[in-house]
Image (spheres, rainbow, N blue to C red):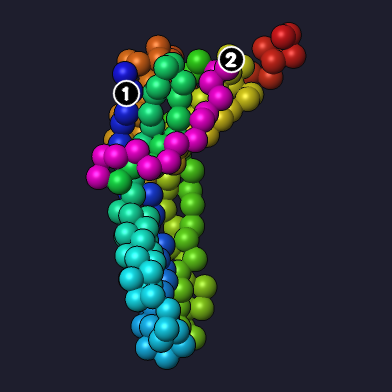
Amino acid sequence: MDKKIITEYNLNLIQKVHVSIILGIGISIFFLIKNNLFRDLNELLLLLFLTVFIIGTISLVISKLGLLIRDNELYKAYFVFGFLIYKQNIDIENKRIVSILKLKRANGMPTVGLVSPQGVDSFYKFYAYLLDKSHTEKTELIGLKKLKNAELIVAFLQKHLNFDYELYSPNFDLKSKG
């Protein structure tokens, strides 16, 4: 039986705007092709192409991140309306510890004016990592905007895979001993 946890949207606001612009450009190209270039092409084929394109881009915009456990294997997963769209296997061998790291990130904002050409938006992101015993090898699980969601990920992994939660503190002496 699959166990899953769905947390946050996959894309941030700027990425959603960019995908929406691409959707608008794609629809415009569709109507240009339909009206001017390929009058003899099967209209049903073009309509099918447009429908698949629209559904695909809307699915990308509303997709959410999460984790999936299937047969004691851990996957980073993408969901649309709770349905699994894509999964990526995460290696959990020799990594039975989970930790949350708070890292500062920055988004370059698209700007038009000369007043603030850089337009950088900085924020904190919370990453759930899998660690080995010495905390020297780490595997990123998922990056989240809210600490609450990162804590839900930790609780999910503790419950279903019996992971231990520890504060990130590398011990290089333990690593050298083997």
Instruction: Return the x and y of residue 40 as percentages of the image width and height.
Output: 42, 83
Q: Residues within 10 Å of mark 2 (few under 14, many from 20)?
A: few
Query: Which residue corresponds to the image point at 40% horizontal and 22% vertical from the top-left?
Result: 70
Q: Residue at x 56, y 30 (%)?
A: 139
Q: Residue at x 31, y 31 (%)?
A: 5
- Identify whether 69 is placed above or below 118: above
As drawn, which residue projects farthest toward the right?
176
- Of helix, strand and loop, which one carries label 1? strand
Amino acid type, label 1 = Lys
Type of residue at label 2?
A: Asn
Above-or-below relation of 49 to 1: below
The magenta segment: 81-95
Which residue has dot 2 on it? Answer: 94
Q: Is residue 124 visible?
A: yes
Image check: 78 left or right of 90? left
| Residue picked out by circle 1 | 3
Query: What numbered label is drawn on residue 147?
Result: none
Residue 124 placement (x, y as % from top left): 42, 48
